[in-house]
Image (tube, rainbow, N blue to C red):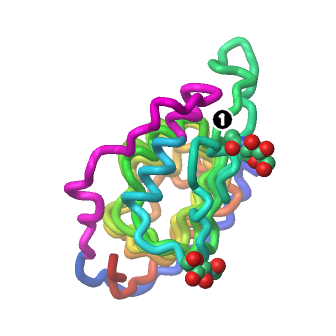
Amino acid sequence: MRGAVFLAVLVAAAALGAAAAAAGEGRPAAVEVDPRWRFPSRRLRDAYVALQTWKRQAIFSDPRNLTADWVGPGVCNYTGVYCAPLPTGPRSRGGGELAVAGVDLNHGDIAGFLPPELGLLADLALLHLNSNRFCGVLPPTLRRLRLLHELDLSNNRFVGPFPDVVLDLPALRFLDLRFNDFEGPVPARLFDRPLDAIFLNHNRLRFQLPDNIGNSPASVVVLAHNSFASSAC
Ligand SMILES: *[C@@H]1O[C@H](CO)[C@@H](O)[C@H](O)[C@H]1NC(C)=O
Ligand SMILES: *[C@@H]1O[C@H](CO)[C@@H](O)[C@H](O)[C@H]1NC(C)=O
């Protein structure tokens, strides 16, 4: 779809005051693992730590009880968590081993934040969190998600500057940050990334058409930047 850029730039109003982004400060250490449990692999043990830390320390409200069955070592059975065998190949590590490949909590109405331990989900290809109440900033540890292909954080309460961590994800093709409270400039480097879709509308981002926008292979780029009152974390 290179060259078929559909550009919808809707420029509106100025930004309002800064939102607090302090979620996650002073947190306890990551959860511990019962030493009697045997996990099929180190990567599923890491996934357990990531998901349990998220549930116990960084999710404050889960009205649909999506994480209610996030109990015990069988992370592949948790609601919204999808496992798949890792690809095999000459350069892949752990080929054929079961790994957490997707987390989909879309429309969960969950309140909380993303803890740094999510960087332990190293094999994640899909992270779909749209229409929740996640707030705060994206942890820099997300840059460990070398296989992440789709990141949908739309319709949440994320704040802070454009999350540069998404520029460091080599496999990322679909980026949806719509309807959040990100603010400040959009880095031009975004348009040099091999993304198929970029949705940034309805944030408080400042945007000037950069010289390199034609470099983007994306078939859809939506950059509308309205301004909203900051939402509470
Ligand atoms: C979630 O669990 C709580 C407590 O068990 C229950 O009161 C509530 O009805 C459940 N909500 C849904 C949507 O199932
Ligand atoms: C996952 O659920 C299936 C079916 O209920 C069960 O047989 C299996 O033991 C569970 N796996 C783990 C690791 O808990």
Q: Which residue is mark 1?
A: 99
Residue 8's x, y, as percent? Answer: 60, 73
Q: Is 160 left, or right, of 213 in this rendering?
A: left
Residue occupying the point 58% across, 55% down: 70
Q: Is residue 166 magenta?
A: no
Which amino acid type is shown beneath numbered disc 1? Ala
Q: Quadrant of residue 114?
A: bottom left
Q: Quadrant of residue 175?
A: bottom right
Task: Name the residue nearer the viewer: 220 or 109.
Answer: 109
Q: Is residue 33 magenta?
A: yes
Task: Name the residue nearer the viewer: 194 or 92.
Answer: 92
Residue occupying the point 63% across, 74% down: 107
Residue 126's x, y, as percent? Answer: 64, 50
Q: Which quadrant of the figure shows ligand 1? A: bottom right
Q: Is 67 left, or right, of 92 in this rendering?
A: left
Is 77 rendered above or below residue 133?
above
Which SS type dominates the magenta stretch?
A: loop
Q: Is residue 207 visible?
A: no
Mark 1: secondary structure? strand
Is 171 rendered above or below residue 6?
above
Furthest-left residue in view? 26
Residue occupying the point 66% across, 48% down: 102
Residue 128's x, y, as percent? Answer: 61, 59
Q: Residues within 10 Å of mark 1 (few under 14, many from 20)?
A: many
Magenta region: 19-47
Residue occupying the point 58% across, 52% down: 214
